[in-house]
């Protein structure tokens, strides 16, 4: 078996999608499950945010950072589902308009909005810059800083791993199973500790944790 961190961590969605298709041989739909965006939300009233959270969108990380200001991380697959299933929300409409000017066209394929609509003036969104991400306090960074991973192993090993991953892509190549997944730093630490009785896996996970400590040391105290 093998477990490794994927070589590309980027804030550029186009660069990530090209990497996922060219190097990982993934489709757009598969890449959408791997790529997480982190957004700052500012509101005049909390109502649009509350209405958004009432829909229980999957695979999100959400924190209040100041009064009427929030931090949200979520995969592209969840965002696309918001556009398809929950476009009645003010949050979804504003998110669509904001991302439409900033993301590659592949992002919207199959979830395009074909009718006109207006943005809500009481809600604004912005990407977190690299500098802003570096300045996040550790309790937020450990939750909102994501990395993508690849597991390779037998069918039995893959099943064991899949039981502990909420969102993933899997592929079978020549009798081996490949699992691609993305976790926050905190999620990976918890994930790795769940395999205490699997020495080979623990050894690989500890190597990755040492790598993460060099990349984001503030997440480890």
Image: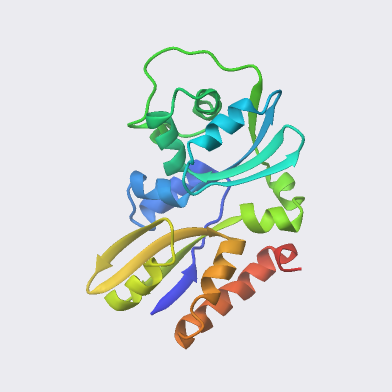
Residue nearest the observer in this picture, 201 or 99: 201
**Colour basis:** rainbow
Give the x, y percent position of residue 117. Answer: 48, 13
Query: From this viewpoint, is residue 154 visible?
Result: no
Asked which quadrant contains residue 221, the reply is bottom right
Q: Residue at x 65, y 26 (%)?
A: 124
Quadrant housing the N terminus: bottom left
Residue shown at the point (55%, 37%) measured from the top left = 53
Q: Is residue 166 above or below residue 211?
A: above
Q: Where is residue 59 drawn, in percent x and y?
A: 49, 49
Total tally of numbered discs in the picture:
0
| Apparent side of residue 150 relative to residue 214 in the rendered image (left or right) | left
- Residue 212 in percent (x, y) is at 63, 68
Q: Is residue 78 above or below residue 152?
A: above
Expressed as whole percent of the image width and height from the top left, the position of residue 129 reads 68, 42
Q: Could you tell whether 204 is left or right of 63 in the image?
A: left
């Amino acid at each position: 078996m093998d477990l490794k961190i994927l070589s590309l961590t980027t804030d550029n969605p186009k660069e990530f999608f090209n990497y996922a298709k060219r190097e990982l041989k993934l489709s757009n739909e598969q890449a959408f499950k791997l790529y997480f965006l982190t957004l700052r939300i500012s509101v005049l009233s909390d109502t649009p945010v509350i209405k958004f959270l009432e829909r229980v969108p999957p695979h999100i990380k959400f924190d209040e950072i100041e009064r009427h200001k929030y931090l949200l991380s979520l995969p592209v697959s969840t965002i696309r589902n918001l556009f398809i299933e929950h476009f009645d929300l003010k949050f979804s409409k504003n998110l669509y308009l904001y991302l439409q000017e900033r993301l590659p066209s592949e992002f919207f394929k199959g979830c395009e909005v074909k009718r006109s609509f207006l943005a809500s003036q009481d809600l604004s969104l912005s990407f977190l810059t690299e500098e802003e991400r570096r300045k996040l306090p550790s309790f937020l960074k450990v939750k909102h800083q994501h990395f993508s991973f690849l597991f390779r192993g037998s069918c039995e090993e893959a099943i064991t791993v899949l039981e502990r991953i909420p969102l993933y892509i899997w592929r079978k190549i020549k009798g081996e199973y490949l699992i691609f997944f993305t976790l926050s730093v905190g999620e990976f630490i918890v994930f790795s500790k769940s395999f205490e009785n699997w020495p080979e896996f623990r050894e690989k996970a500890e190597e990755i944790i040492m790598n993460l400590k060099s990349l984001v040391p503030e997440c480890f105290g």
